[in-house]
């Protein structure tokens, strides 16, 4: 974020889809910034599945045991919103919908919310399931996982054929469809944008 000129203090809500390390272990490093560099009065909301707060606090303690022992804590009011079932929730001023996804046996979530008159949806990690269609219906921006560039029988992740299927209507209607979480670059798909680190996408 520093390299890209992104101010971490500009983040108000963090959405965690599930508690695998590649989706949640970055939080100790962000919170470290609030221990040693930043301070703010406005709450920082962290949204995720049940057990989120305990998991984050445990990882932070393991990451910085000396700071924990010294009583050094992030200088920002932390607010955790734990999602235990499908429904409507709120993180500060942001209302959102959380929908359980199919990611092996984990509690995994997709999110949908409105911001600046646009509707956004994020699948998180998921295998093929009917919930994806409900999550993505009519959105302006869809952020979808695309782990496998070829057909796969992986039950916990999407392949390129799944993404083509679930985003067909959105791409026809000109929505911004962003692919992430790729194990390799998939073949070109009309209307599908392959995300690259550090890039900015506009809708």
Image: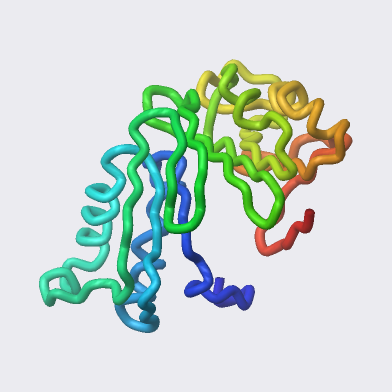
Residue 106 placement, left or right of 57: right
Q: Which residue is drawn at 35% across and 68% down?
A: 31
- Residue 173 location, x and y as percent? 86, 34
Q: In which quarter of the image is residue 190?
A: top right
Q: Residue at x 43, y 23 (%)?
A: 104
Q: Which residue is drawn at 59% across and 16% down?
A: 153
Residue 140 placement, left or right of 92: right
Q: Residue at x 50, y 66 (%)?
A: 11
Q: In which quarter of the image is residue 50?
A: top left
- Residue 86 location, x and y as percent? 43, 28
Foreground pick, 193 / 82: 82
Up the image or down, 24 lies above or below 73; here it is above
Applied colour scheme: rainbow
Q: In which quarter of the image is residue 20?
A: top left
Residue 128 placement, left or right of 57: right
Split into 4 quadrants, where in the image is the C terminus?
A: bottom right
Residue 142 visible at all: yes
- Residue 16 location, x and y as percent? 44, 46
């Amino acid at each position: 974020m520093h390299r890209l000129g992104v101010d971490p203090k500009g983040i108000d809500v963090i959405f965690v889809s599930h508690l695998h390390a590649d989706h949640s272990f970055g939080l100790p490093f962000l919170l470290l910034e609030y221990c040693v560099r930043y301070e703010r009065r406005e709450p920082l909301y962290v949204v995720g599945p049940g057990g989120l707060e305990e998991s984050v606090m445990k990882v932070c303690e393991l990451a910085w045991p000396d700071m924990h022992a010294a009583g050094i804590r992030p200088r920002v009011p932390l607010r955790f919103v734990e999602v235990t079932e499908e429904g409507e929730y709120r993180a500060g001023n942001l209302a959102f919908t959380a929908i359980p996804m199919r990611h092996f046996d984990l509690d995994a979530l997709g999110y949908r919310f409105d911001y600046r008159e646009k509707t956004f949806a994020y699948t998180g990690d998921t295998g093929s399931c009917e919930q994806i269609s409900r999550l993505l219906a009519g959105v302006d921006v869809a952020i979808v996982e695309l782990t496998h560039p070829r057909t796969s029988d992986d039950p916990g992740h999407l392949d390129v054929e799944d993404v083509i299927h679930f985003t067909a209507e959105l791409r026809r209607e000109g929505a911004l469809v962003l692919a992430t979480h790729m194990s390799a670059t998939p073949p070109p798909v009309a209307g599908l944008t392959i995300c690259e680190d550090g890039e900015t996408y506009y809708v």
